[in-house]
Image: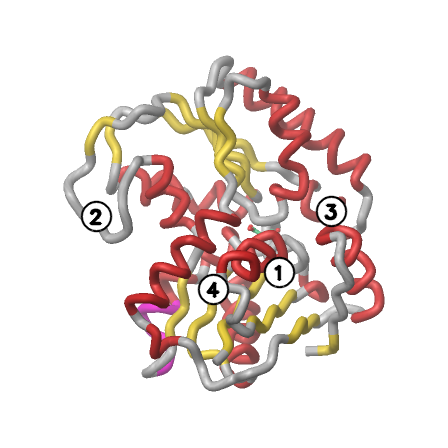
Amino acid sequence: MAVGIFDSGLGGLTVLDAVAKRLPDLPLVYLGDSAHAPYGVRTPDDIYNLTTKSTQRLFDAGCDLVILACNTASAAALRRMQEGWVPEGKRVLGVFVPLIEALTERQWGDNSPPREVDVKHVALFATPATVSSRAFQRELAFRAIGVDVEAQACGGVVDAIEDGDMILAEALVRSHVDALKRKMPEPDAAVLGCTHYPLMEAAFQAALGPDVKVFSQANLVAESLADYLTRRPEMVGPGTDSAFLTTGDPARVSSRATQFLRRQITFEAA
Ligand code: DGL
């Protein structure tokens, strides 16, 4: 009975934490590919190869359902995985759709034609690979009309977070928000399109100002997973134990994760 949660590194812990609070009895196996983070500066082929390898590791750990708690992998690899790689009886879901459904005021599975929504000017903060995939704009265009999106590729932020250098991460957030505001002076909503960024949510909100509504994914994904498992309870796999796996150095990754989630997290080698 386990669900897998994958990220390139530590960012997916923001999703894991929200899922663990929403579904406390569900065993979760987390895999962070810290040896290869950040993904956001890699090519789509590279991201696809790394993501399929880690997803297979989670299937092997007894998970039938894997959440890609990584926008970069969701943007660059998910569709290709769903079209030709995911084995019979397994499922891989991404993190874009719950976010875009919230932004466009839709319930799960509402496939009605695109319509006007409340937000008109949306700032998207994401990794360079997610921004260049244009996956966010594509998913949004299926659901909303008349929304102007300005995307800001936030180079360096994921590396700083993975290194535990929060002062650098904060300075980079301020400079990326400034750059965005030069292109779109008055966004009415901002999307944190990388699961590392909720760890910097206060810095984003402070730089954007109180009038900008900031959407971040953790709770939206947790809610959407709870809903999915009510409809598809058989997708809870045969694994019974929770675990934290990393391709990086377990001691180093455990100490950063403990610092971020403010509770003891112990990673083991994947
Ligand atoms: N947390 C990831 C995301 O949501 C990963 C970023 C990276 O590895 O560059 O995009």
Separation of residues labelled 3 and 2 (CA atoms): 36 Å
Q: Mark 3 Cα within 10 Å, few/some/many (few <14, many 20+)?
A: many
Three-letter amino acid code of the residue under disc 3: Ile
Label pair 3/2, CB-CB below 8 angstroms? no
Residue displayed at 48% across by 14% down = 186
Query: In the figure, 130 relative to 2: above or below?
Result: above
Instruction: Magenta stretch: give its range.
Output: 81-87
Q: Mark 4 Cα within 10 Å, few/some/many (few <14, many 20+)?
A: many
Residue 220 location (% of width, % of height): 44, 48
Q: Tag 4 or tag 1, which sits nearer the N-term? A: 1
Q: Choose between 265 and 248: the one closer to the eye.
A: 265
Instruction: Label 1, secondary structure: give it.
Output: loop
Residue 66 in view here: yes
Separation of residues labelled 1 and 4 (CA atoms): 12 Å
Residue that mark 4 sits on? 67
Residue displayed at 55% across by 54% down = 18
Separation of residues labelled 2 and 1 (CA atoms): 30 Å
Q: Choose between 90 and 79: the one closer to the eye.
A: 90
Residue 83 location (% of width, % of height): 31, 69
Residue that mark 2 sits on? 110
Is the CB atom of the residue marked by disc 3 within 8 angstroms of ligand 1's nearest atom?
no
Query: In the figure, 98 relative to 180: above or below?
Result: below
The image's mark for residue 8 is 1
The image's mark for residue 161 is 3
Q: Tag 1 or tag 3, which sits nearer the N-term? A: 1
Is the CB atom of the residue marked by disc 1 within 8 angstroms of ligand 1's nearest atom?
yes
* Marks 3, 2: nearer the viewer: 2
Residue 119 location (% of width, % of height): 35, 24
Three-letter amino acid code of the residue under disc 1: Ser
Query: In the figure, 255 relative to 163: above or below?
Result: below
Q: Choose between 76 and 28: the one closer to the eye.
A: 28
Residue 4 location (% of width, % of height): 52, 71
